[in-house]
Image (cartoon, rainbow, N blue to C red):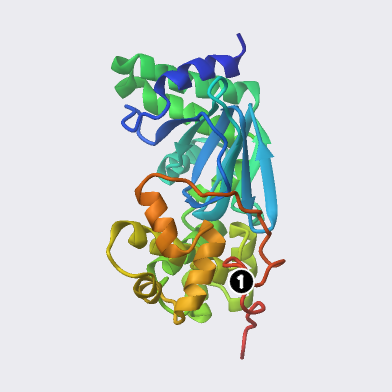
Amino acid sequence: MNELEKIRAMAMRHAGQTNLLIPRLLSYSLDHPTEVDPMIYDPAVSLVIQGTQRMFIGGKMFEYGPGQSMVVAAEIAALGQICEASQDKPFLAVGLFLDPALLSNLILEMAALPELPIGSGYGLSTASESLLLAWRRLFELLDRPAEIPVMAQSLEHELMFRLLMGPHGGLLRQIAGADSRLMYIRKAMAWIRGHYTERLNFKAVAAVAGMSVSVFYDRFKAVAGVSPLQYQKYIRLHEARRRMIAGQESAAEVGFAVGYESASQFSREYRRLFGAPPARDAERAKVGLTRVAPRQWVPPGRDIAGPMADDAPAPQDRT
């Protein structure tokens, strides 16, 4: 039995549990394919054990399966899809939400490493045998709960060390650095999430990142895969959907509450992202129904009517 099969056996026993004894660790299983769904990813590392998954970020599509690992280093707006899963062979993945403080402490114990040029805020690679072993050793603790208080931190350190020494080590070092370029982009992302109802002020959000407007725009898009304005639209529409499902407000009231000035524009962009008009989508969600028909993914920039399309060219600095 290889390492991936050993992890599979343990992950299946704990799949779907929301109270695992190791904080930030998760095991996820699904017995049917899904449609393309929008989501906001938190910084995390994941490993697919069985089945196939797709992720769409900006105009890029990633398809990955057993033994492949995805690192997400920022709060990325993306679309995801489980495309290979069945009752006999469900999709199965494990993941760990990243702790910047733990990474920082670990890097201090390693030789000094220079900060690399900023790239995207995510990466995909095939897991090495040493990384699979680290995943397996961490998951084994779930079957030996008495050892967790003593062993969990050291085994999480081992997993992070293997990741730091792998293809995405530079990306993880960016997460750990309080003054790294990635961290400044993440601060800007947090600012946008905190001011999502307002008209996007490029000068204000660029100032949060400590960059000129044009440099900020380019670096934000490199990390997030979408422009700041596209990112804000994602946040608005996710909050709108939460309100539609939880509350008694009308679609127009929700649209205005999350920052839209036009009810028709809100309804159109909501439908483009979630596959149905706001009220219909909310009713389906309340009764646990899925979309009637799958939607075709159109990369942003190729469909200017879509919610993820840019409304304006990149802003320029003005003196």
Residue at the spot of label 1: 217
Horizontal side of 157 relative to 310 (left or right) equals left
Q: Quadrant of residue 63?
A: top right
**Looking at the picture, how far across and down is residue 109, in whole percent?**
49, 35
**Looking at the picture, how far across and down is residue 4, in whole percent?**
59, 19
**Looking at the picture, how far across and down is residue 126, in whole percent?**
67, 31
**Quarter of the image where the N terminus is located:** top right
Nearest the camera: 201 or 213? Answer: 201
| Residue type pointed to by label 1 | Tyr
Question: For the point 42% across and 78% down, which residue is it?
Answer: 198
Nearest the camera: 167 or 9? Answer: 9
Pick out the residue farthest to the bottom.
Answer: 319
Q: Say if 158 sits above or below 44 in the image.
A: above
**Looking at the picture, how far across and down is residue 164, in whole percent?**
58, 37
Which class describes the residues within 10 Å of circle 1: few (<14), some (14-19), or many (20+)? many
Q: Is residue 63 visible?
A: yes
Horizontal side of 128 relative to 236 (left or right) equals right
Q: Is residue 167 visible?
A: no
**Quarter of the image where the C terminus is located:** bottom right
Q: Say if 189 sits above or below 291 in the image.
A: below
Q: Say if 124 sits above or below 267 in the image.
A: above
